[in-house]
Every structure is written in structure tokens, then in C-alpha cells.
Image (cartoon, rainbow, N blue to C red):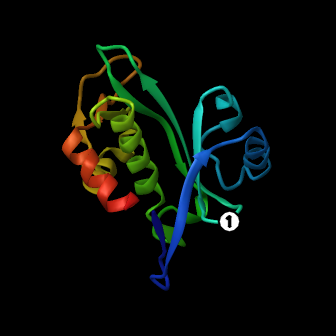
């Protein structure tokens, strides 16, 4: 998989791996780069990090949940965060979020969920997830999901895997 330097257009090989106990300490010390969530709370969960190949700096983080219940049968992206310097109009490296989402899609297929991936969006990200990654917004609101759900189906998941992970 590749990420791209916004200014130069140069692409760099990246990799996704599980977050180790030591990595959680690094994330905690580097809290100014990952401000949205207290990642230490998710040590017992399935958390992944995206780094440049042979690099140490974490570019993005994602927590997923493998829902094996036949009524759900999907991977949930519980949390997704890109390091502060790689977000918005002044970002330095792009494709980080796409690589992490595509990784969740690939895990969904590997684990027998046929590419089904979902997340519970924040209001301001609904259009972003739809326009950039092809999520479909399902506005079924509950107290736990005031904005509904965002869902990826198999055909879109396979497209994201092809675009970001190949």
C-alpha cells in the first residue's frame, strides 16, 4: 500500500500492523498528534496503526470490532484517526484514512463477512465518508446512533482494497 506526500506527489510504501503495548505508550506521549480519542482505553481491543514501511512514526490509527453474530456479520470501524498534521487542507501525507478503511474491508472479506463494513459517523463526516470512500448513509437513528450508520457493501469494499492496498 502507498501513501503520498501532498507537496511533491512522491509515494511511499506503508504498512498496517497491530498496536503493541509499547506503541500505546508512544501514542499517549504524542497526544498532540492524536487528540480525538483516548487510545489507552482501547488496549484490550483490536487496534491497528499505519506507518511508513521501515518507519517509526504512526500516521493513523483504527480500532475495529469483528461482529460474528449472524444478525450483524460485519466489521465495525469503531474509531479511526489520522495524525493531526495529515488532516485537512494543510495535510502533509494523504491516503492514510483510505488505507485504513481498505484494510478493514480486506479483514471483512478474510473473516467471512463478505466485505460488509460499517461505522457510526459524526455529523460532519457523513459527506466525507460518502464522497471519498463510497459509504452509504443509512439514517436509522437510535440513542447510540443519532446519525444512523455508514455502510460499505462487498463491491465497494473490493474497490477500496484495489485502490488503496494494491
Residue 130 appears anywhere in the view: no
Tell how many labels: 1
Q: Where 110 falls versus 141 (above or below)?
A: below
Seen from this angle, which residue lies furthest left?
155
Question: At numbered mark 1, what does the secondary structure look like: helix, strand or loop?
Answer: loop
Residue 46 appears anywhere in the view: yes
For the N terminus, the quadrant is bottom left
Q: Residue 66, located in which quarter of the rendered image? A: top left
Between 93 and 145, the one lying in front of the other is 93
Q: Where 137 falls versus 145 (above or below)?
A: below
Q: Where is residue 44 in the image (x, y as percent from the top left)?
A: 66, 26
Q: Where is residue 107 in the image (x, y as percent from the top left)?
A: 41, 39
Tell me the residue at 69%/61% (across/down). 57
Q: Residue 154, located in which quarter of the rendered image? A: top left
Between 29 and 140, the one lying in front of the other is 29
64 left or right of 34? left
Tell me the residue at 46%/67% (across/down). 2
Crowding at mark 1 (Cα within 10 Å: few <14, some 14-19, many 20+)? few
Q: Where is residue 82 in the image (x, y as percent from the top left)?
A: 54, 54
For the C terminus, the quadrant is bottom left
Tell me the residue at 33%/53% (across/down). 161
Q: Where is residue 53 in the image (x, y as percent from the top left)?
A: 60, 65
Q: Where 125 falls versus 50 (above or below)?
A: above
Between 66 and 91, the one lying in front of the other is 66
Residue that label 1 marks? 55
Tell me the residue at 38%/34% (across/down). 119
Amino acid at each position: 500500500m502507498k501513501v503520498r506526500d501532498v507537496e511533491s506527489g512522491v509515494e511511499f510504501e506503508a504498512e498496517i500492523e497491530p498496536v503493541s503495548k509499547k506503541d500505546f505508550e508512544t501514542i499517549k506521549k504524542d497526544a498532540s498528534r492524536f487528540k480525538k480519542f483516548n487510545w489507552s482505553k482501547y488496549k484490550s481491543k483490536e487496534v491497528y496503526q499505519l506507518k511508513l514501511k521501515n518507519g517509526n512514526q504512526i500516521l493513523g490509527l483504527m480500532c475495529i470490532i469483528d461482529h460474528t453474530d449472524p444478525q450483524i456479520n460485519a466489521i465495525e470501524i469503531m474509531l479511526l484517526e489520522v495524525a493531526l498534521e495529515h488532516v485537512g487542507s494543510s495535510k502533509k501525507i494523504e491516503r492514510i484514512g483510505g488505507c485504513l478503511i481498505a484494510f478493514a474491508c480486506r479483514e471483512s472479506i478474510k473473516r467471512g463477512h463478505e466485505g460488509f463494513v460499517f461505522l457510526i459517523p459524526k455529523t460532519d463526516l457523513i459527506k466525507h465518508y460518502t464522497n471519498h470512500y463510497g459509504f452509504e448513509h443509512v439514517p436509522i437513528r437510535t440513542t447510540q446512533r443519532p446519525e444512523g450508520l455508514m455502510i460499505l457493501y462487498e463491491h465497494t469494499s473490493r474497490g477500496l482494497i484495489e485502490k488503496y492496498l494494491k
